[in-house]
Image (tube, grey):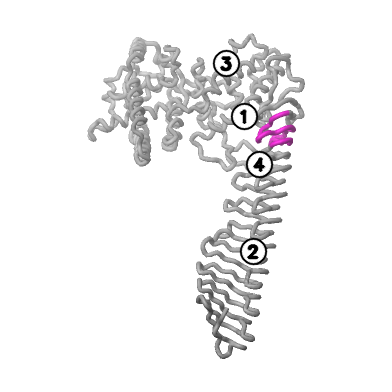
């Protein structure tokens, strides 16, 4: 460097300009920059601090043209010692030790302006290495060993939002080696969990893999081989009361030939399914000879256990329908969602209605037996399915060695597994309308209950029949040219009808649950709003009772005394004719035409949003201005 110091350049303050546009202003000693001073590079970088023999040395501050800065110790012109760096662009700040211009030693870095994302610990040449604590933007925290900026070695990770914790060995950022993973299940309103699940054992690439022990919340535990997060290989399952099953597991299921041969020597416990309870099937076992009851129970529990993964998945899927997420993802299934599962699996096509299934579950109080809000734990669902399986298939399976197990196995194979999760119906089958529809379930449940109390004789299950529903619409003045009794009956029976049995179409005494009642309302909402759109504004009010004269409903002074009169027979004859050419079928065909056109002409996202908003308005218009205004 060549400069032109002032007259005091040998000793004292001065200014030096250098080739290339660099400049120094500060103290000189023996013609050299020495002492406090400011050096500005032509590119805009500036150093302000101590100099020794022309070199930045000691305490100083670097300021970059973009606003970034370093303040701290400097050695031979580079950051060395202890100092703080602030990045203007990313709001990253580091305070700690430096070595030859790199973060090295102990230091703390904040990755955001709010200082919610940070690392405090050891550094090696700009990389997190050694021991340190990292807090992520989500609030998750890792405390342990690092290598090359990755979790590596012994450490503990806490996922606060997920409610999980892992403590053990890491390699290149993932769990690898021995460790313990804990699911911190928090109890919330409606939660079925009260304790924690825990796994201790081998991990490979972040998954439970190798040998380990899984401790269930209720006290049961599994010891054995794991593969890709599942029980796989040789293992032993011990129930909370000490009973043991030892054998081969594949993809979380026990593999055995117990159904084809002898009873397992130690029996099984359903606590792996729900640790709090066992299956409630005493009503079935009481009809089995006493010496065979334990065998029957253990065999059916074994079949349930073999379907563990599928049953848990089905339960989780249906309890989420129309439901916001739970902090620990543990909302219980409600009866409304259970009805939807049963209908999706066509259980009502086996000669048993949903209300009859409700009656099978004898543990419910009269107030809960048909309520859509009754909570259903996983074990209650399983008990229900066992009861239903026996009701449907007991005659077909009476020659089998283990009756209950054979019935349940057939139900799963023929009905549940092929159909579950294929959601039908209008309430949950149209997710974009579920939220709007669910706003009215509470008030409509009150209407359903009130009408049942009027129609049902004392001490009789308060449920609604198809005949009662027809009369309710007649009494409310909602029948007319566009919604005739035959068309309404067509709608009522549409999903309940077994395609292979025409006679089911004619059953006016069929009891219907609140789900079926509410989905009839949703079907009529489409028809009513179509009607409004076709009529002039001055004619768009709900039909008056004068419209009743166009109805072919039987006339009676007391609706509770309606029987197989000639008028009701006439209605059935009309229904048979309607089966060949019904208005509802025309609506279905027209809807199919619309769906075909939609498939041929895809809508833009804007159009889809407009249609969804229109559909929401349709729901609100029907319930607010038509149905509930008539109550």
Q: Mark 2 or mark 3: which comes first in sequence?
A: 2
Q: Report helix, strand or loop for mark 3.
A: helix
Farthest residue, direction bottom:
7
Q: Is residue 231 magenta?
A: yes
Q: Position of residue 304 (x, y in %)?
A: 64, 24
Q: Position of residue 408 (x, y in %)?
A: 61, 19
Q: Residue at x 72, y 46 (%)?
A: 169
Q: Residue at x 39, y 11 (%)?
A: 564
Task: State the CA–CA distance, disc 4 to disc 2.
Answer: 32 Å
Q: Is residue 110 magenta?
A: no
Label total for image: 4
Q: Report helix, strand or loop for mark 4.
A: loop
Q: Which mark is drawn over residue 309?
A: 1
Q: In terms of secondary structure, what is the magenta stretch mainly? A: strand
**Of residues 82 and 614, which is closer to you in this image?**
82
Q: Residues within 10 Å of mark 4 (few under 14, many from 20)?
A: some
Residue at image mark 2: 102
Q: Between tags 4 and 2, which lies in front?
A: 2
Q: Residues within 10 Å of mark 3 (few under 14, many from 20)?
A: some
Q: Mark 4 or mark 2: which comes first in sequence?
A: 2
Task: State the CA–CA distance, disc 2 to disc 3.
Answer: 75 Å
Query: The magenta stretch spans which residues?
Result: 209-233
Q: Report helix, strand or loop for mark 2.
A: strand
Q: Which mark is drawn over residue 391?
A: 3
Q: Which mark is drawn over residue 206?
A: 4
């Amino acid at each position: 460097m060549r400069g032109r110091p002032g007259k005091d350049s040998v000793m004292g303050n001065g200014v030096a300009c250098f080739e290339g546009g660099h400049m120094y202003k500060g103290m000189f000693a023996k013609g050299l920059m020495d002492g406090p001073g400011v050096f500005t590079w032509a590119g805009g970088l500036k150093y302000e601090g101590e100099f020794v023999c022309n070199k930045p040395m000691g305490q100083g501050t670097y300021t970059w043209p973009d606003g970034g800065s370093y303040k701290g110790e400097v050695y031979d012109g580079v950051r060395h010692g202890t100092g703080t760096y602030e990045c203007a662009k990313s709001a990253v700040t580091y305070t700690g030790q430096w070595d030859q211009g790199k973060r090295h030693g102990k230091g703390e870095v904040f990755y955001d302006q709010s200082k919610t994302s940070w690392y405090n610990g050891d550094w090696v040449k700009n990389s997190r290495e050694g021991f340190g604590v990292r807090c992520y933007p989500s609030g998750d925290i890792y405390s342990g060993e690092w290598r090359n900026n990755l979790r590596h070695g012994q450490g503990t990770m806490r996922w606060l939002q997920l409610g999980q914790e892992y403590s053990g060995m890491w390699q290149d950022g993932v769990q690898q080696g021995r460790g313990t993973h804990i699911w911190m299940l928090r109890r919330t309103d409606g939660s079925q969990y009260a304790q924690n699940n825990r796994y201790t054992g081998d991990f490979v690439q972040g998954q439970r893999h190798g040998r380990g022990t899984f401790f269930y919340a209720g006290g049961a535990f599994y010891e054995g081989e794991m593969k890709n997060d599942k029980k796989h290989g040789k293992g032993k399952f011990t129930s909370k009361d000490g009973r043991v099953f030892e054998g081969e597991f594949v993809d979380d299921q026990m593999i055995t030939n117990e159904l084809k041969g002898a009873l397992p020597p130690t029996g099984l416990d359903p606590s792996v399914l729900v640790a709090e309870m066992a299956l409630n099937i005493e009503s079935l076992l009481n009809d089995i000879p006493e010496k065979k009851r334990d065998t029957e129970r253990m065999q059916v529990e074994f079949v349930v256990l073999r379907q563990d993964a599928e049953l848990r998945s089905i339960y989780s899927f249906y309890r989420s329908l129309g439901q916001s997420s739970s902090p620990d993802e543990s909302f219980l299934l409600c009866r409304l969602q259970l009805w939807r599962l049963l209908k999706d699996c066509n259980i009502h096509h086996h000669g048993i209605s949903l209300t009859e299934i409700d009656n099978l579950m004898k543990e419910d109080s009269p107030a809960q037996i048909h309520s859509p809000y009754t909570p259903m734990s996983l074990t209650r669902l399983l008990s229900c399915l066992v009861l239903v399986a026996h009701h449907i298939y007991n005659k077909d399976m009476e020659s089998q060695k283990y009756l209950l197990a054979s019935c349940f196995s057939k139900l799963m194979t023929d009905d549940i597994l092929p159909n579950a999760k294929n959601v039908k119906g209008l309430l949950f089958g149209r997710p974009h309308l579920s939220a709007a529809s669910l706003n009215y379930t509470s008030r409509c449940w009150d209407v359903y209950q009130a009408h049942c109390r009027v129609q049902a004789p004392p001490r009789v299950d308060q449920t609604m029949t198809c005949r009662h529903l027809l009369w309710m619409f007649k009494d409310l003045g909602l029948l007319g040219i566009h919604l005739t009794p035959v068309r309404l009956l067509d709608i009522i029976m549409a999903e309940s009808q077994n395609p292979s049995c025409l006679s089911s179409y004619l059953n006016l005494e069929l009891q219907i649950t609140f789900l079926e009642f509410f989905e009839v309302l949703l079907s009529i909402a489409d028809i009513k709003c179509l009607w409004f759109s076709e009529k002039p504004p001055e004619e768009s009010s709900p039909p008056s009772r004068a419209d009743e004269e166009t109805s072919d409903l039987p006339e009676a002074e007391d609706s509770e005394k309606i029987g197989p009169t000639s008028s009701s027979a006439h209605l059935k004859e009309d229904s048979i004719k309607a089966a060949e050419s019904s208005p509802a079928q025309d609506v279905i065909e027209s809807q199919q035409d619309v769906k075909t056109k939609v498939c041929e002409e895809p809508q833009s996202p804007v159009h889809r949003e407009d249609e969804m908003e229109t559909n929401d308005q349709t729901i609100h218009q029907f319930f607010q201005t038509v149905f509930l205004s008539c109550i």
